[in-house]
Image: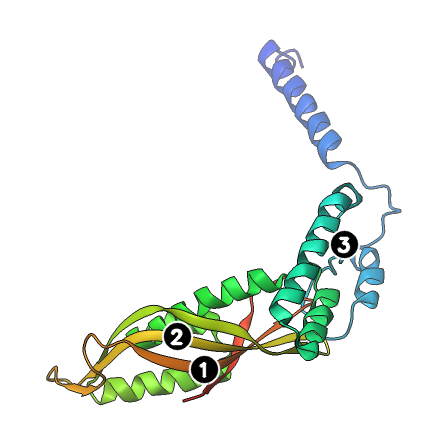
Amino acid sequence: MGEFLDFPTIIVIVVAIVVLLRLRSVLGTRTGNERPPSARYERVSRTRPDNDETVVQLPNRKPQADDAETERFERKREAEIEKFGNGREDIIKGLNEIAAADAGFSPKSFIEGAKSAYEMIVTAFAAGDRKTLKSLLDKDVYDSFEAAISEREAAGQTVDFTFVGLSNIDFAEVGMDKRNAVVTLRIDAEVVSVTRDRDGEVVEGTPGQVVSIADEWTFVRNTRSRDPNWKLVATNDLQ
């Protein structure tokens, strides 16, 4: 007994007790009255819409402390809607519908984002960059783009492509489809595009010549999703 209670052993016991008390203070103890996890989240799951992609519904308003900033943002957005609506009541109505469903929606920011997306997509398509396209396109649109790339590759063709810039981009159709915001843009761009065969001979386009292209692209976003990204779901060549 005396050997068991030697000084080193006592030190070990004291350390063990201290560690146990620390763990208890951090993790707590069970009393037998705790609700199981399913009960804790039952009310939340019952209030979520069917087939909702989000885990938690985010509020449409910013916290109370940001009310002044929210008001400034809303006034700025109202001015943007008038500007980009360009006197078209259908566009103004559609932009207001999306703004009501998505507190963070800004027509100006959307247009700026669409400009970047357009350049990324047409450049990736010319380069055969499937990875970039897959991250930006709806599945049906991606499948169409991928099929065109595969056909081009099978024929041994390559594309020399330079994006020059956008001469115009504007809202063509805007509105809500249930929970989805749907925006169709009229896009006019200038590019240099030359297609060559496997021997390097030009089969389409003129080297160094800038050409104009016109498209209508339709973007969709679920306004109840936490994912801020829009997907390109349809393209229409206007030429």
Q: Name the outermost residue toward the left.
A: 199
Q: Say what amino acid the circle numbered 2 marks.
A: Ala
Q: Which disc, if any, is residue 223? A: none
Q: Quadrant of the N terminus?
A: top right
Q: Which disc, if any, is residue 61? A: 3
- Relative to the observer, which residue lies in front, 26 or 21? 26
For the residues bearing labels 1 and 2, Cβ distance under 8 angstroms? yes
Q: Is residue 90 above or below residue 102?
A: below
Mark found first going from the N terminus, 1 or 2: 2
Residue that carries the numbered disc 2 in the rendered image: 189
Q: Name the outermost residue toward the right.
A: 33
Q: In this view, does 153 lie above or below 18?
A: below
Residue 29: image location, x then y, percent: 79, 37
- Relative to the observer, which residue lies in front, 185 or 54? 185
Q: Report crowding for label 1: few under 14, some 14 to 19, many 20 or more residues within 10 A (C-alpha).
A: some
Please tell me whether mark 1 sits on a helix, a strand or a loop: strand
Q: In this view, does 101 lie above or below 137?
A: above
Mark found first going from the N terminus, 3 or 1: 3
